[in-house]
Image (cartoon, grey):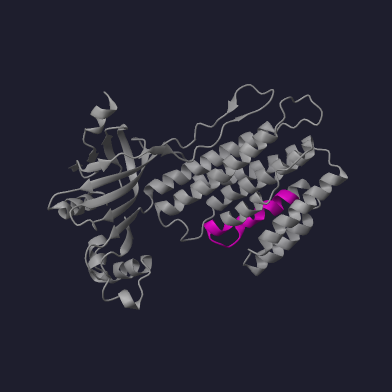
Amino acid sequence: MSWKDRINQEIRLTTADGEIYNPLYLVSPRRVDFNVSQFEFINIDGTLVNRQNIKGYKYDITIVFQEENHREKYLKFEKSVKDKRPIEVLHPMYGLFNAHIVSMVDDPTALSNTTVSLSMLETISEEYPKTSQDANDQVNIDFDNVNETISETFNNDTTLKTADTNNIANKKDEAYSLGASSVKSGEQSNNYILLYNAANNSTADLVSFLIYPSLFLNRVTYRLDLLKRQFNNLTTLVSTSNDKKIYELFGNSLVSAMINVCVTPLEDDYNNADDVLNVIETVSNLYNNFITNVDVMQTDNGSQLDAYIPNYETMSQLTSMVNYALANLFTIALTANQKRTAILNADSNVILLAHRFYGATDDNINTFIDQNKIGLNELITIKKGREVVYYV
């Protein structure tokens, strides 16, 4: 079938309640998000790839409800997609797939139609295999194993010179400067100083110092931003193999710390799917950046003078931990509250809107007010054209 024939076909959205919708649609691209990089090692056959990579497509699809009753059509659709189960999509360009709507924007401001922007994540139809191992427990086990391996392999692979010791001290000072300005708890601040001072004693103590910010009593996004700044502060302008091994040591530790952040959220860190997906994207991007940098540093021939080849065991364990943690976060995102955005086509108020989206109880009204940061000037009337958000 030619693309011209395909584009003339309707899109079909079958929601979990059995309703079928055939709105107009705009052709838009799709992409695969959060795939981690492959990594190849000199003198090691094959490529390091983990089957737990997230491979679902992300679709940003715009649909349009028309005719005089376009608002009624949309409101029926809105009610259907409050069901958290995936919808079935038959797309003229991309075929048949199941997907979760993770965000939706309702725009009726054109008056003659309602335009709806959908952000969807493709999902498999079966449930994920059930295991007796708690995901957080498994990540904690992997976290301890990875950090032990980071220390052991660095000690086994590296003979430090005076210049290397100075290099490590400078990187440690830079990391501490960023971390000390971010820690809030007085007890943790004292612990951080102690770990900083102890970091000169052994590689294991240095790794403990580098991963400690993952335990700061701050929001997940705040801790990830700190670790990202510490990582970006590492220079990739390296010359000797020891410089590269030191970069590998710091990078491995900071990526490992990021994974620990993911499994130690505060109570309100993962309120909705967007919160979780943003965390996945931050961690995935930094991990891919680290892998790319180490890949560039690797020498073509392991036998040449001052050759550098990253440690296979460390990178393999780190990759497995990253993939396992992100896969479980992805599962959390699919079951978390999903964001919806509505652009008001008429004046309204908090009671009517809370009733429409949640049901008119005092708790729901307060929730709606908090989510939309509604001040005193909007308690009576919320004006036409205002964007409001709610979660299903």
- Left or right of 146 on screen, residue 30: left
- Whole-percent x, y for residue 200 in the image: 80, 52
- Left or right of 255 on screen, residue 158: right
Position of the N terminus, as image quadrant, is: top left
- Whole-percent x, y for residue 107 in the image: 27, 55
Dividing the picture into quadrants, the one containing residue 154 is: top right
Dividing the picture into quadrants, the one containing residue 245 is: top right
Label the magenta part by its dominant secondary structure: helix
- Left or right of 244 on screen, residue 293: left
Residue 392 shown in magenta: no
Position of the C terminus, as image quadrant, is: bottom left
- Residue range (magenta): 206-223
Q: Residue at x 25, y 51 (%)?
A: 115
Q: Residue at x 58, y 47 (%)?
A: 140
- Left or right of 282 on screen, residue 385: left
Pick out the residue farthest to the left: 68
- Whole-percent x, y for residue 379 in the image: 30, 75
Compared to residue 195, the image places residue 309 above or below, namely above
Compared to residue 113, the image places residue 160 above or below, namely above
Q: Is residue 78 something one can see in this rendering?
A: yes
Q: Is residue 133 something one can see in this rendering?
A: no
- Whole-percent x, y for residue 81 in the image: 26, 49
Image label count = 0
Q: Residue at x 72, y 56 (%)?
A: 174
